[in-house]
Amino acid sequence: MKKNFSNTYIFIYSAVLVVVAALILTVVSVSLKPLQTKNQQAEQKQMILKTIGVEATRDNAAELYAKYITEADGYYRFDGGIVLPLKGTGLWGPIWGYLALDNTSTVVGAVFDHKGETPGLGGEIATDKFAQRFIGKKMDTQAIHLAKNADRDNPYEVDAISGGTMTSNGVTAMLAKAYDDYSKMRKEATE
Amino acid sequence: MKNFDLIKLPFSKNNPILVQVLGVCSCLAVTAQLKPAVVMALSVTVVVVLANLIISLLRNTIPPRIRIIVQLVVVSTLVVLVDQVLKAYVYDVSKQLSVFVGLIITNCIVMGRLEAFAMVQKPWPSVLDGLGNGLGYSVILIVLGFVRELFGSGTLWGYPVAEKLGLYSIGYENNGLMIMPPMALILVGLIIWWHRSRNKDLCE
């Protein structure tokens, strides 16, 4: 460290460094984008298939999806029902999921995922254990909501996650939103 | 110091986790299963080797006043690259590791090696030093991942070992504590204990 660096040198040095780093990252990001998008789409198809009880790997997801699911007006139809997409926000970032309903609007399968909820607390929504609580619940005349000490026999109530109140509220909100869209869609269909 | 020592010492006498106690956060967080532990170990090794190389090549041009910033830019760039590659090629693992890949940037081992070694050493020894420290970190991660997955979930790399051996039918239960981070800390403590009892000269 015997050299003395002038301020001009420091400014130019840092500017060049940052520009080079940005260039490298841009090139890599653009060139890997197609592979990453493909992974994300396959994962989405896997999730939708899971709600109707079809276990898919990432490799056969596209094929099975084409076989079981038809897309229409932002919904996913399968033989015997419909899959509602859910989108909302948890505590730290986006949460999402899919809810499969049969023709009587009874839940036959659910799956949730999140971007960055706290592992072990809000992050629990991504577990099968949580998703199973929705099976048999109803989305016909009102939306399902999460509640503390939920009544198991109430078809509109699901036990919330202890320690994950903000995330649970987010799940309730996105279910309400999905119910609104779904009931509007059903109304239009009967008219 | 001989070149071979650069790789050998971080394995034991100067292990980044056991002796310097650096990089413990990620070591507790990602070792519940073997696979993420191995991927994390590889990622950190790649980052520390490349960062050491780049910083060592640049060392005479880096103005001391902004050296930490320069190191950070180099490390962050490498980490984002690793993250992008993982997302493209091992998507599941990258989801499991989630924030911890990004946190390699703040892994003290990386910055520590840059500041203590690469800033004042030639490129080749720096690469070896990075490799040694990366592998020293990896060994501990893999041991932890192995023990925690085996006893916590009864699997290894996802393969149901306990089930295949028929242990559940004779009343065996998985140890739930093993998959919690505190157990990783206890295991690291036990390893450090064993390590110090073998190397008396490390004891203060």
Image (cartoon, coloured by chain):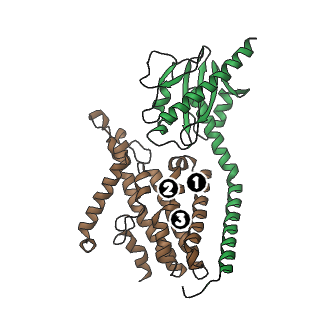
Chain colours: A green, B brown
| SS category of the residue bearing label 1 | helix
Is the C-beta separation of discs 2 and 3 under 8 Å? Answer: no
Residue B37 visible in the picture: yes
Residue furthest right as drawn: A191
Quarter of the image with the C terminus of chain B in it: bottom left
Marks 2 & 3 on one chain: yes
Q: Chain of mark 2?
A: B
Q: Is disc 1 surrounded by few (<14), some (14 to 19) or many (20+) residues within 10 Å? A: many
Q: Chain of mark 1?
A: B
Residue B86 disc label = 1
| SS category of the residue bearing label 3 | helix
For marks 2 and 1, give the CA distance. 9 Å
The residue indicated by pointer 3 is: B46
Side of B170 where A147 appears, left or right:
right
Q: Give me the residue at 48% from left, 77% from top.
A: B117
Q: Amino acid at mark 1?
A: Leu
Q: Amino acid at mark 2?
A: Val
Residue furthest bottom as drawn: A2
> Which corner quadrant of the image does residue A56 belong to?
top right
Quarter of the image with the N terminus of chain B in it: bottom left
Q: Give me the residue at 55% from left, 39% from top.
A: A114
The residue indicated by pointer 2 is: B39
For marks 1 and 3, give the CA distance. 13 Å
**How far across and how far down the image is residue A182, in percent?**
66, 21
**Looking at the image, residue B199 lies above or below residue B99:** below
Residue B43 visible in the picture: no
Q: Amino acid at mark 3?
A: Val
**How far across and how far down the image is residue A77, in percent?**
67, 24
